Amino acid sequence: MSQDRARLVPVLHNIATQLRIDSIRATTAAGSGHPTTCASAADVVAALFFSEMRFDPANPHHPLNDRFILSKGHAAPLLYAAWSAVGYVKHDELMKLREIDTDLEGHPTPRLAFVDVATGSLGQGLAAGLGSALNARRIGSDYRTYVLMGDGETAEGSVWEAADSASFLKTDNLVGIVDVNRLGQSRPTMWQHDMEAIARRWRAFGWHAIVIDGHNMDAILDALAEARHTKGQPTAILARTFKGYGVSFLQDKEGWHGKALKAGDEENKAIKELEATLRPVADGAVDALLHAIPKPPAAPAARTGNPSLPPPSYKAGELVATREAYGTALAHLGQADPRIVALDADVGNSTFSDRFEKVAGDRFYQFYIAEQAMVGAAMGLAARGAIPFPSTFACFLSRAYDFIRMAAISNSNVKLAGSHAGVSIGEDGPSQMALEDLAMTRAEPNFTVLYPSDAVCGERCVELAAYHPGPVYIRTSRPKTPILYGADEVFTVGGSKVLRQSDADKATVVGAGVTLFEALKAYDLLKKDGIAIRVIDAYSIQPIDAATLKAAARATGGKVITVEDHYAAGGLGDAVAEALAPQGQTVVRLAVREIPRSGKPDELLDRFGISAARIVAAVKAIG
Amino acid sequence: MSQDRARLVPVLHNIATQLRIDSIRATTAAGSGHPTTCASAADVVAALFFSEMRFDPANPHHPLNDRFILSKGHAAPLLYAAWSAVGYVKHDELMKLREIDTDLEGHPTPRLAFVDVATGSLGQGLAAGLGSALNARRIGSDYRTYVLMGDGETAEGSVWEAADSASFLKTDNLVGIVDVNRLGQSRPTMWQHDMEAIARRWRAFGWHAIVIDGHNMDAILDALAEARHTKGQPTAILARTFKGYGVSFLQDKEGWHGKALKAGDEENKAIKELEATLRPVADGAVDALLHAIPKPPAAPAARTGNPSLPPPSYKAGELVATREAYGTALAHLGQADPRIVALDADVGNSTFSDRFEKVAGDRFYQFYIAEQAMVGAAMGLAARGAIPFPSTFACFLSRAYDFIRMAAISNSNVKLAGSHAGVSIGEDGPSQMALEDLAMTRAEPNFTVLYPSDAVCGERCVELAAYHPGPVYIRTSRPKTPILYGADEVFTVGGSKVLRQSDADKATVVGAGVTLFEALKAYDLLKKDGIAIRVIDAYSIQPIDAATLKAAARATGGKVITVEDHYAAGGLGDAVAEALAPQGQTVVRLAVREIPRSGKPDELLDRFGISAARIVAAVKAIG
C-alpha cells in the first residue's frame, strides 16, 4: 500500500462509519426503513463518493458528472447520507427521512436532483445505468456510471437482460457493484456468500468480474481502479459484505431486514459500537478529500429550440400503416436532432424503427428480445438528456410494465411506441395482440397517450411525443389505413378531430386507430338509411379532448358510442366516459370483451364487436 | 451406434422431414407464419415425440403424460404437425392453420388439449415448464417436462429467472432445449453459433448443459438419454441448428423470419428438396414407433368436491390486516387440500404467505426476487392440476404483467395475490405502492378481481379464489383494519355488501379495501350534519355487483361517488361507471390522480384525495 493509500483508507473508513451512523439515526427517527442494508454497502459508497467519482457536489445535474445509481433503493438513507457528507443535503434534513414534507422519501425518486431514476423496484438500476453509459457514448463524454445492486435483486431477470446488453454493447464505462450481504428480506439469498457462483454468472454474461471483501477499503479502491482500466467490457465488482456490518447484534443476523432500531438503548448501543471503530486521522482529512473530488469539465452549451420536421408527404387515400409513419418520422427526427435515440427489441423491421437505424445507426441501440432492459436503458438515457424512443410490439411492452410504472414515478422523458395493437393484426393470434396497453399506460398519472389513425397523424404524433415533456406512449397499428389528413393538419396533445358532423347528428361515435375507419364506414352505411352521426378521431387518448367530446355529446342528445381495438376496461371508452361524467352523460362502449383468436383482421373486428356493422347496430340501438 | 439405434435414426429423420413439409404446406396455405423456425427444430421434436416422451397420444390431458411446452410459440405449425403425426390432429386440419374456425391458431393456446399454456410471448415457457416439473414432485409422479426454446428468446430475463429457480429447486425432471438457429427476427442473435458462450450461461446458472448438433439425430437421442440420467439438476440441451434447415434457399439465410413460402414453384421446390433427403426405412416403421410410444400409468382418481374451511375467528372491531387474513386462509386451505400450492418472491413475511410455508412447506415454492418466474411457474402448476397462489407486493406483479396477460389468454387457474396496495402503505413511498394493479387485472377478460376490506372477507376471498375457475387476483392491504363482518357472513364472486342505508340517503358511496373505512367515517361525519349516505363494500371488483349498484344509484337520485386507493383509470371508479351507464347514471370518482410520495398513511389518504374528509366534501358538492 502506498503512503497516500495508507492515509486515505482510514479516512474513508471513518466516512463509511458516519454513513452507517446517519442511516441508523435517520431510520430510527422515521420509525421505519432499512438500516442494515445501508450498513453493508457503506464502505463502497464512501469510496465512490470520496475517492472514485468525478462530480460537482453542488450540481448533481451536471451533464458530465459521473453517475451513481442506487439500484437497491431501500438503502436510500445511505444515499442521502452520502449526499449530505458531500454537502448537498443538509445534515439536519436527514432526520426528516420519510416525512411528507421532505423529498428524502423511503426510496429515492428524481424529486431529488441527485437521483436519475426512481428505484425501489429491484432489478431496474443496471438497465438505467446502461442507458446512462450509452448516453456518455452519444455525447462523446468520458463520464462513468456506477450502479449499486443488492445480491437478492440479481434474481430479477431484468438484471441479466441488462448484463447481456451491456456486454454486447461493450460499455466499459459502466460498473455494476453487487453488495453481496447474503440476506434477503425473508431468508438468506439463493447463493449466500458463494462468491464464485455469483462471479460465474457475471463472467458467463461477458463481464469482467472482480470478487472482493466489501469491507476492505483497500480492496474496494483496487477494484474500482481495475474497473477503470478495463476496456471493451463492463466490470462487475462483487463485494462480499455483511448486512448490519459493524454492529454486533445486527451483523449477518436474520430478522433485521427493513427494521429501524428502537430509539434509546438499541440505537445508542449500535452507534457506540460503530464509533468505537473510528480510526485516528489527520485534522481536516475529510474536508481535504471533499475538496479533492475531481470536477467535471465545463458543460457544453444546452441545446435550445427544437427542429421542425418536413411535412408528411402522402396522397389522399393512399394506404399507409401508422407503424410505417412512425418509422418515417423517427428517421426524420433522428437526422434533425442528435438527442433522439431509438431502442429496439429485435422487431425493428416490423415497428419500422429500422428506418432510424439506417440514418442514425450510432444512436440506434439493439436490445434483442429484452424489453425490460430496453425500457430501463431508455430511462437512463432520458435522465442524461437524450430523447429515447424504445419500441416493440405493443403487447410486449407489458413485459416492461414495472419499468413503465417506475418511468411514471420518475416522470421520465421516455417515448414508448408499441405497434401491432389489437385484434386487427389478424392471424398471429392473441399472444401478439395488445389489448391492454391503453389501460396500462393511461393508469399512470404522468403519461401522455397518443393513438394515430392515419400516417399524417402518425408522423405528427412522433413529433409531439419527442418534444412534449414526460413519458409518452404512441400506439400504432399493423394494417395499412387510408390517408385522412392533409400535410398541413395540426395535431396537439389533448386534441381531437371532428371528421363528420351535421346539425342532424343522432349520435356521436368516437374512434381511434383502425376503429376510426370502421366509424367512417358506419357513417356511410347509416347515411344510406338517413341517419346522420358525428365521427370523432380521438388521437389523443390521454389527455382526452374533453371540451370537444362534451360539445359533441350535447349536440347529439347525449348519445355517445366509443369503439376501440382494445379490451373494455381502461381504454378509450373509459377515458371518454370520465370526460362526459361531469355533464351527466354516459357512453356505450364497443370494445373487445373476450380473449380473441386467430383470423383475418376484418373477421376479427366483426366477431369481437368493433366493426362498422357493429357500430351501425349500436347507433340504431341507442336510438 | 447399436443396431436398434441404426434402425431408429433414419425413421426419425423421415418423421422430422415430414414435419418440415407439413409446416411449409400449412404456412403457405395460411399465407403467413414461420416455416423456417419450424425447420430448425423439427429433428428435436421428432425425437421427443417418437422416441423420448411417455404419453398417450389420444389423451393429451392425461395427468401423468410427459409434457412438451413449445416456448418458441411461433413454431406452432411444427407442434401441430407433431400432434398430427401421432394421430391426435387430423392431417387435413393442418391446412386450415390460422383460420378463424380452427383452434390451430398462429401461436398455440390451451384451446388445444395438448397445449398447457399459451405461448408466443417469448421467454415464458421455461417458467411454465418449471411449474410442471414442480407439479410432478407434488403428485409424486415421474413424468418429465421438456421445454423447447428459441435462442433469441434467451435474451429475455425471465428465462434466467426460471433457470436460477429450477437449479435452486433441483428439478432434474425438467429439460430445457434451446434451438440455436442463429437468426432472430431482424438480424442474427447476440451469440449466433457461439455454443460455448451459450453453454457457459446455462452452466453458470447451475444447469447440466449439453451442446449438440441439432440436426444429428443420434446426438439428439444421446443428449435426451443423458438428461434422463442426470440427477440433482435440470439439463439444458443446446442444439446448434439452421433456420430453414434442409431447403437450400432458406437454410441459414437472413430475411426469412416469419415468411410463408409462395404457393407454386417456391413451395414445391422446397418440398422437393426435403423429400430428396428421405431415407429408406422398413415398411410400417413409423407406425411401429407410434405404437411403441410408452404410455403413462393409469391416472389417479380425480379428486371430487372442495373442502370447507373453518369459519374466520375474529372479534368485532378487532384490528387485522387483510394481508394477514390472506395468510391465515391460505394456511387453512393448504392443510385441507393438497392441490393448493403457494409461491413467494421473498416477501412471505410481508404477504403472510409464510403461514402456508409453516404448514405445507413441501408445497411452498420460493422464487426469491423473480416475479416472472413465480407467475410463470404458477401457470405451469395450474395446467397440471394444482391450485397455485403466487403472491408478492401488488406493485411487483406489474413485473409479471406479460405473464398475467398470457395467463388470461390461457384462462389459467392461477390465484394471484398482491399485498401493500395503494398509498395507505405510507412511508415506503410510490415505488412500493400498487396503484395500477386493478387496471392491469381488470383489463384482462378472464380475470376475477377481489378486494376485501376486512379480515373475514379476506379469508373468504381466498376460499372463493381457490375454487372459482380461471385466473383470480386478490388485492390486500398493509394497514390493520377493523373487523366488519361476522364469521357466518357469505361472500360471492360478483357480490357486494350494503353497509349503511336509509330511505333518506342523499348519495351512494362505493369503497373497497381501506377506503371503505373512510366511507364509514364519512357516514358518521355526515350524519352529524344530518346527511344520510348509502355505503357499499364492492369487494368483488370484477365482476362488479351491477344490480346492487344500480338499485343504490336509483335510490339515491343518481348521486354516486366511488373512492379507491388506486389511480383514477381502470379501477373501481371505471367499473362502477360502466355498471351504471346502461341506466344513464354517472359517477364521481375519488382516486389518486398524481404520483404520490412518502408520508404517514392517513396524511397520504387525505393529500391524495381519498380520505373521509374528501368523501364528505364530495358528498356535499354533489348535493
Image (spheres, coloured by chain):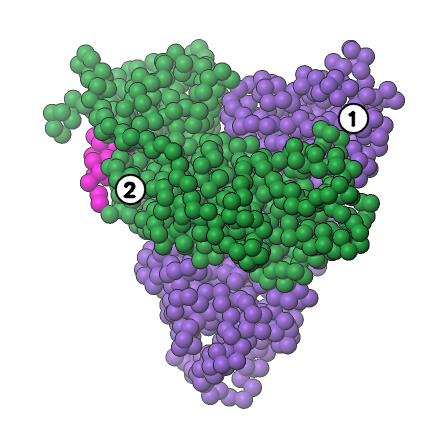
Chain colours: A green, B purple
Is residue B473 shown above or below A109?
Answer: below
The verdict on residue A284 being magenta is no
Along the line of sight, which residue is nearer the eye, B594 or B433? B594
Image label count? 2
Q: On the same chain: label 2 and label 1?
A: no
The residue that appears at 41% across and 14% down in the rendered structure is A93
Tell me if I can see residue A507 in this picture: no
Image marks 2 and 1: residues in contact by CB distance under 8 Å: no
The amino acid sitting under disc 1 is: Lys
Q: What residue type is labelled 2?
A: Arg
Q: Residues within 10 Å of mark 1 (few under 14, many from 20)?
A: many
Residue, far right: B503
Q: Mark 2 lies on which chain?
A: A
Which residue has dot 2 on it? A137
Which residue shows up at 51% across the image and 70% down it? B260
Up-down: is B504 above or below B55?
A: above
Q: Which contiguous range is marked in magenta? A: A213-231
Q: Which chain is indicated by disc 1?
A: B
Residue designated by label 1 = B559
Looking at the rendered structure, which numbered label has been put on residue A147?
none
Please give the name of the residue rendered at 34% of the width and 33% of the height, measured from the top-left corner.
A303
Left or right: B62 as drawn, with respect to A177: right
- What x and y, as percent, mark residue B356? 60, 38
